[in-house]
Image (tube, coloured by chain):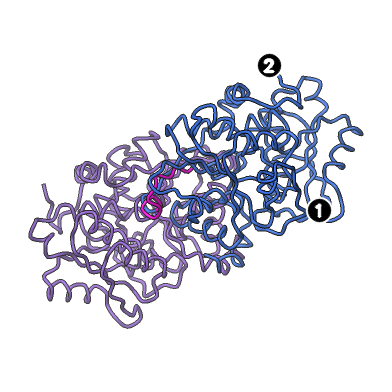
Chain colours: A purple, B blue
Amino acid sequence: MTPSTTTLPTFADVESAARQIAGVAHKTPVVTSRAVNARTGAELFFKCENLQRAGAFKFRGAYNALSRLTPDERRRGVVTFSSGNHAQAIALAGQVLDIPRVIVMPSDAPEVKRIATEGYGGEVILYDREKEDREAIGKRLASERGLTLIPPYDHPHIIAGQGTAVRELIEEVGALDLLFVPCGGGGLLSGSAIAANAMQANCRVIGVEPAAGDDATRSFKTKQRQTVDNPKTVADGARTPSLGSLTFPLVLQYVADMATVDDPALLKTMFYLWERLKMVVEPTGALGAAAALDGTTPVRGQRVGIVLSGGNVDLTQVGNWVQYR
Amino acid sequence: MTPSTTTLPTFADVESAARQIAGVAHKTPVVTSRAVNARTGAELFFKCENLQRAGAFKFRGAYNALSRLTPDERRRGVVTFSSGNHAQAIALAGQVLDIPRVIVMPSDAPEVKRIATEGYGGEVILYDREKEDREAIGKRLASERGLTLIPPYDHPHIIAGQGTAVRELIEEVGALDLLFVPCGGGGLLSGSAIAANAMQANCRVIGVEPAAGDDATRSFKTKQRQTVDNPKTVADGARTPSLGSLTFPLVLQYVADMATVDDPALLKTMFYLWERLKMVVEPTGALGAAAALDGTTPVRGQRVGIVLSGGNVDLTQVGNWVQYR
């Protein structure tokens, strides 16, 4: 039942993850807006993962992965690296399951995410994003302390767990013509694409990245894995250097197209969601909505799913961002 | 079936309003938060009227009132005065019912509320809050143009309509020990108190005002109607000069106590709701939550209802407010 870390996850793994997280993760609501539908001429369905436990979809994969560890692995604990939402998710899932957890976070991660991670009882180790390699730090801690490394996206249980959000969305609202999903390292995107493809093969899945961190878009178009170095973008959850060894082939196989959104357009959409849906969505969480609303992918007349992936926004930045509203 | 404008509304009127608005107003969700419950040691149920149509509870009363006009009254149209949320609600309810509407708004109303009102097709007339009397302007327009005046709170159909939110809340979550309700002119508060009292007589209803505009609190304590003159508070929806001739006796009859919250505490709670519930709530909408969280009314061990009355926040102000987070 447990796939190896080099086997690509399938829809059966997503269904298994859905059973694993049932009653622990929230089945998040789907919201709609007459105003947004009128503006686009489409039917938009927003899957509110900002209302997931710890404020982002990441809890799904984190709980799925941690709850499958052996008793011995649980006792020794886990280590991960993350800019924020996966960090909080591992910290909370470890709290729920009583598993020690060490979390390697960049020193410039939003303070709200670092404080929340510590609040869930995770041991936080900061690193310098410009000079240090978080994967190397994670691997070193794993070997020194006997911890199991749970990476933020390139892991079959993580990918399968993230796929459960779109499984719920399609189960609730029925057939979709299009599905827009934020893309950082591709865990949410590939899990979502596995689910959409299995449940409804003619649904076109569009992955959306910040324009400054367009490595996955370039990888998709060239069919060669491309990287980006510390992109400057407000979408702090999508500053990952590249797709992973599992997420890259899954994106190539199941995703119909990739799109990018620049920061001003992203913030404009984020505030539009705050004002129209009354939902606090973080910049990364608004990527899918921004692409759906910007007109480059025609949506008129279609049934469109959008994953609002998280809501852990740094409110101290709003004064700087509101000029783009 | 139609009460006169000088008869105090009853729970039968609230039930009639619930039938009248069914399928047009949203049955808004009730949300809970483990974090908030853990912090307070209570069970808190937040009624999300920020997710109501036009972003506030006001649509309930506005639609209830407008939909009961005679064909002749509908044809001639309505006039109202409001700092914002009632304005939007009348504009939208008039759009739905195809009734012409003139809305008298203060020139310093939040721009987001004025633009939304115009967006729903209301004719907006601005007045100077310091120098002019909005009621006099409304009455003059009513008589000059043959319009029906629909005041923002002192009207039995408005009060009965606003009471439908708490009716839904108690119907959904069951018995409550305490209920915190924001108070401006007292329409929401008295409607809520009528509903709570009828459905569950031992539920203590607490009305909550901004400290700078504590006219209702003083009126409640002295049993004489007190006024306040243009109070300076971020709770722009609660800057009303006094309770009304209908809402005052209803508050005296059904409300257990009044509380006040100063602006820094109000903004701190508002941002807490944004971060914890991921819900955009406006300052006025956070009044009930602020009182429930500030410790002056003990809530530990109790089942507590809180009306989040609106979400039409002026995002351009967030940079100035975030220091109180």
Relative depth, front residue between B75 and B291:
B291
Label 2 amino acid?
Met
Q: Residue A207's spot in the image, x, y percent?
A: 39, 54
Residue at x-position 48% and y-position 60%: A261
Res B1 label: 2
- Across and down, in percent, residue B204 comes to 51, 38
Mark 2, other Cα within 10 Å: few <14 / some 14–19 / many ≥20: few
Q: To which quarter of the image does residue A145 belong?
A: bottom left
Three-letter code for the amino acid on which mark 1 is drawn: Arg
Please report the residue visible at 80 percent of the width from the left and 38 percent of the height from the top.
Answer: B102
From which residue to which does the magenta span run? B36-46
**Residue B231 position within the rendered picture, expressed as x and y whole percent measured from the top left:** 73, 56
Q: Is residue A302 visible?
A: yes
- Name the subunit of mark 2: B
Residue at (18, 73) in percent of width and height: A139
Front in this rendered view, residue B184 or A32: B184
Circle on res. B129: 1
Whether residue B220 is situated above or below residue A175 in the rendered picture: below
Q: Chain of mark 1?
A: B
Which quadrant of the view contains residue B91? top right
Residue A291 appears in view: no
- Residue placed furthest toward the right: B144
The image quadrant of residue A244 is bottom left
